Amino acid sequence: MKRLAVLLFALIAIPAFAQSAAHKASGVVVRTDQAASKVTIKHGPVPDLKWPGMTMTFVAQDKALLQKLKPGQKIDFEFVQEGRDYVVTSVK
């Protein structure tokens, strides 16, 4: 019974931990939506997620990040997965 409890904990905890890992990418800002706290980025491949380059919309962790971004701007950014959302945590 104890082994079963440990196994169940591992099955629950490991995916939650993996989702909080930060991923890095480079791309170009397509548009920002200040009201929804979102930014659309055309980014290159993200090898650790096995993603090809694509255009996708991210949630901004902090609205202040969006104020620095303009369409056409090249950026390096970090993001994490929170549930079904991908959240930009930093931009350079």
Image (cartoon, helix red, strand yellow):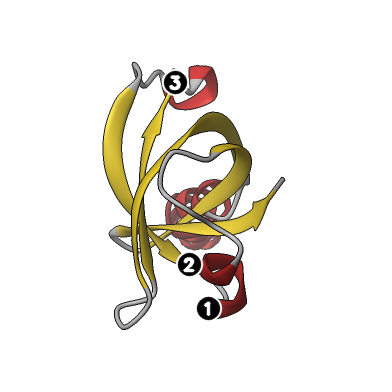
* Image quadrant assignment for residue 49: top left
Label 1, label 3: how many angstroms apart (C-alpha)?
23 Å
Left or right, 84 with reference to 49: left
Label 1, label 2: how many angstroms apart (C-alpha)?
6 Å
Q: Residue at x 43, y 38 (%)?
A: 72
Q: Nearer the viewer, residue 45 or 9?
A: 45
Query: Which residue is label 1 attached to?
Result: 63
Q: Residue at x 48, y 23 (%)?
A: 46
Query: Which residue is label 2 attached to?
Result: 60
Q: Nearer the viewer, residue 7 or 69?
A: 69
Q: Quadrant of the C terminus?
A: top right
Left or right, 15 with reference to 22: left
| Amino acid type assigned to the residue bearing label 1 in the image | Lys
| Amino acid type assigned to the residue bearing label 2 in the image | Ala
Q: Residue at x 56, y 71 (%)?
A: 67
Q: Secondary structure at mark 2?
A: strand
Image coordinates for residue 43, horizontal then vertical, percent: 42, 29
Query: Which residue is label 3 attached to?
Result: 44
